[in-house]
Image (cartoon, grey):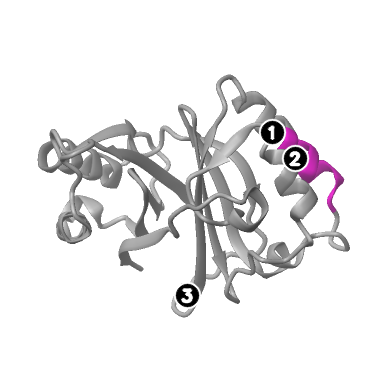
Amino acid sequence: MERRTFLLQAVPGCSPSDSELAELFDRVTGDPGFAAARDFSVWRAEDMIFGYYETDETAYPDRAGQVVREAVLSALAGKAILISSPGNMRLMFTSIWQPKENKEGLFHRVFMTRLKPGCATEYKDRHDGLVAQMDDSDIPAEGRESSNFTIWNAGDYICGYNEMEKPAVTDSDENAPWEIRMLEIMDWLTNDVDRISKEKHEAVRCVFMKL
């Protein structure tokens, strides 16, 4: 099974509405070319629009990805820029654990950040180091409850996707030292660490989901 993601940036003053995006992706997932894909969702914060889905196709580009790309370029021309087509985002972190085949009832945590210039390699190195030193005893509580956690990169942007058995806890002090250190190399676009950064950001919202 392959995990595929894509990223759009809305054009200032011409941004598509949430309902417009929902209608577009409802048509996309109803296309026969999308039949091999599932667990499709689209998330939004500020001017960024992030999509995630899973497919049994290993080829690239996969048929569902082609459907998404063609639909976005056609329907959102002048309204959103396609920063990364499905399958082109770089995987920066993986903590899969035991993904659930039945996605009904799962909670999601999706977040978005903007890397400071030239910090993509440092971001990847820090997460690689985190994986190398973790064992089952020191996995944060959020990690123990995650069943499908991946982090992706396109350009200067980072997007995280996490399926969870319980709602995400973002006001715990457990990960505060890590989050403070990560502020050295990135700025948040979502409100996950506002209490630490003392800044105000939007909560990410789901504009479309089809399991």
- x%, y% of residue 186? 60, 35
In the picture, measured across the screen, residue 173 lies left or right of residue 123, that is right
Foreground disc of the pair 3, 2: 2
Q: CA distance from mark 3 to mark 2?
A: 36 Å
Location of residue 25 by image quarter? bottom left
The amino acid at mark 1 is: Glu
- x%, y% of residue 210? 31, 66
Q: Considering the image in quadrants, where does the C terminus appear?
A: bottom left
* Residue under label 3: 102
Question: Above or below — where is 82 with respect to 145?
Answer: above
* Residue under label 1: 184
Dominant SS type (magenta): helix
Q: CA distance from mark 1 to mark 2?
A: 6 Å
The residue drawn where x is 55% and y is 49% is 199
The residue drawn where x is 63% and y is 58% is 195
- x%, y% of residue 172? 72, 66
Crowding near pointer 2: few (<14 within 10 Å), some, many (20+)?
few
Q: CA distance from mark 3 to mark 1?
A: 38 Å
Point out the residue furthest to the bottom here. Answer: 105
The amino acid at mark 2 is: Arg
- x%, y% of residue 127? 71, 39
Location of residue 205 by image quarter? bottom left
Looking at the rendered structure, the secondary structure element under dot 1 is loop
